[in-house]
Amino acid sequence: MDEAEEVNSNRKSISKTRKQMNENSPAFLTYKILYEAVSICHAHGVEHVVLCPGSRSAPIALSFMRFEGIKHFVIPDERSAAYVALGMARQTKKPVALVCTSGTASLNFAPAVAEAFFSELPLIVFTADRPAEWIGQADNQAIFQTNLYGKHVKTAFTFPTELSHPDSEWYAIRQVNEALNIAKIQPKGPVHINVPLREPLYLDEAYDFGILSPKKVEIVQSERTLPSSVYDNIAHYQRIMVVSGTHRPNKTLVELLSKLGSESKIVFVPDITSNLVNIPGSISFAELIIDTIKPDEISNFVPDLVISFGGPIVSKSLKNFVRNKEIKEHWHLSGHPGSADTFQKLAKVFDIDSVGFFKAVLENGKLQPNPEFARNWANSQVDIKPKTKIALDSLPFCEVKSAYQILSSLPDDVVLHLGNSLPVRFASVFPFIKSGTEIYSNRGTSGIDGTVSSAAGQSMVDTQMHVLICGDLAFMYDSNGLWNNYLKDNLKIIVFNNHGGGIFRTLPGAKAQKELEEYFVVKQPLNFGYTAIQHNCHYFHCKDFETFQITLYGFYAITGKPAVLEIEFREDLSIENLKQMIK
C-alpha cells in the first residue's frame, strides 16, 4: 500500500469511528427518537406543522422540517402561530402539530390552546423545555412547563430527559401514540407534549434517518346505535325543537334535517356557525322571531323537547328563551359525560353523532309532532324576513346595513369567517346568507385575540376564497396574523372600523357608565392602510355607501396578494335599534 492509499484508508477509518461515536451520542439519540415521533405523527394523519423559531426547540423543529411527508410553516409570533395551526386543523379536519421553544413562548400558545379545547380541534402541542433540575435555578428561558395548560388540554405528557436506554425510546413513542389517539377521538381537542432537552442541541451535520417504521397504535371504534326505548320516548313529545350549535359542513346532515323539517314537522333552529343556515325548513331567523313575539303568543312557540347537537350557540335570545320556559327535557347528541348544560334542562346525553341519531329516528317512523307548532315558527319566519329586509334597506350608511349588504352579496363558494363581538352577532340576527356558504368563528372561548391568524391559517391550506369580517380592535390585536411568508391571495379581510369596541355602546350596563369611551370602548383614531401595506396586502378604504358598493366588487376580484378593506363608520345604530324598527 502506497502512502496515498494509507492516508485514505486512515481517513475512512477515522470517519467510520467518528460516525459510530456520533450515533451513540446523546444528541444523536435525541434526534433519532424525535424523528420517530414525527413519523408517528405522520402515521396518525398529521400533514401540517407550525413552527416558531427558537434554539431549545431546534431538535424538534428540525426533525419536522426534514420529514418529507409533513409541510412546515415557520411563524415568528407564538400567539399568532397557535391560531394559524388552529385554523389549519379546522380546515383540514386533521390534527396539526405546533412547536415552540422553552419559556414564555409556550405561554403564548395558551389562548389558542383554550380555543381549540372548547372548539374540539386537535392540536398536538410540542414545547421544548430545560431539564427538570434547571427549572427555578435562574436559568435562561426556564419556567414551569409541566401541565402548563391545565384543564385546557385533553391530556399532557413529558418526554423522558435521558434517552440512552431503549425503554426511554419505547416510552417516548408510546406517549406520542397516546397523544394522537386522544386528540383525535371524540370530543377532539389539543394535547400537550413537553420535551426537556439537554445540550448539545445540534448535530455536526444533518443525518439521514431514512424511512422509519415506528409502531403506530390505533383505536378501533365501533358503530353506535340507539336503544329501542328512545323511539317510544320521543313519540310522547309533540312540540320538538332541534337546535344546532357550532358544526362543520355536512351534506348528509343537511339532507336529514331538511327531511325532518318537511316530513316530520319538527322545528329546526340552526346557529349561524352551524353551517346549516337557510337549509330547507330551517328557522334561521329565530332570534328576530323570539324578540318580536307578542307576550300573549309566547306559549305557542315553546317546545316540550329540545334536542341539541354541535358546539356553542351565539344567540343570547335563543338561549334565554329555552332556559326560561317550561320545557320538559333537553337531549344532547354526540356528547360525553361532561357535556354542557347550556339550557339548564339537560336530561339525556347520547353517545352518538347527529347523523346517526336523526337517520335512526327518521327510519323508525314513530314521530308524531304537532304540525301547528311547526306552522307557528314557519309563518313567523315568512312574516319577519321581508320586514327585516325593508328595515335594513331603509337605513343610512352604518355597520348594520353594511354587514347586511356584505352577507347577502357574498360570491359563490366562499368560506366566511366572523369575528367576535359585533360581526358574528350581525350574521346571527339577519342571516341573509346563501345556503352552502361555509361559516366559521372562534366561538369556543369567543375571544378576539386570534381572529386574523385563524382565518389566515385556514386560507393557507385551502384554495377557496376566505372572507373575514372583524372589528378594528380585533384586527389591531391580531395584526401579527399577517406577519408570515405564507399568506395567499385567497384571503380577504373586511375591517369594520368604528374606532373602538363599539359593542359596548349597545350594552345596557356599559353604556350607562361615565367611563364608557375610555375604558369599555377604548376609543382610538387609527386607520389601517399602513398596516396592510407593510404586510404586503392590497388596501381599500371607504366611508360612505356609494364608495362602499363600488369598492366591494374590486376587493373580491383583485388577485396577487391578500386584500384588506377598511370600512369607516361614524354613525351608531345598534341591532336593538333595528329590532325596534321591525317591531
Image (cartoon, helix red, strand yellow):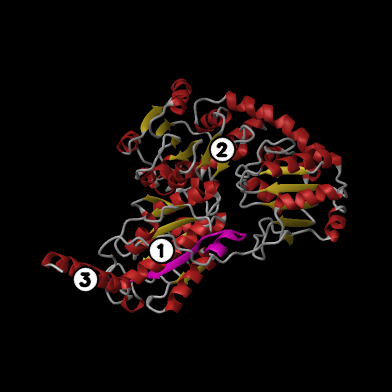
Q: Could you tell me if residue 512 is visible in this image?
A: no
In magenta stretch: residue 358: no
Q: Where is mark 3, residue-wise?
A: 14
Q: Residue at x 42, y 48 (%)?
A: 515
Q: In this view of the protein, which residue sits in the foreground, 362 or 479?
A: 362
Check disc 2 and give the amino acid type.
Phe
Residue 79: x percent and y percent?
40, 54
When asked about the image quadrant of residue 35, the answer is: bottom left
Q: Which residues are magenta?
A: 180-199
Distance of label 2 from label 1 (alpha carbons): 47 Å
| Of marks 3 and 2, the one in the foreground | 3
Q: Where is mark 2, residue-wise?
A: 426
Check disc 3 and give the amino acid type.
Ile
Q: Where is mark 1, residue-wise?
A: 35
Q: Earlier in the sequence, mark 2 or mark 1?
A: 1
Q: Image height check: is 346 above or below 454?
A: below
In magenta stretch: residue 189: yes
The quadrant in which the N terminus is found is bottom left
Residue 552: x percent and y percent?
47, 26
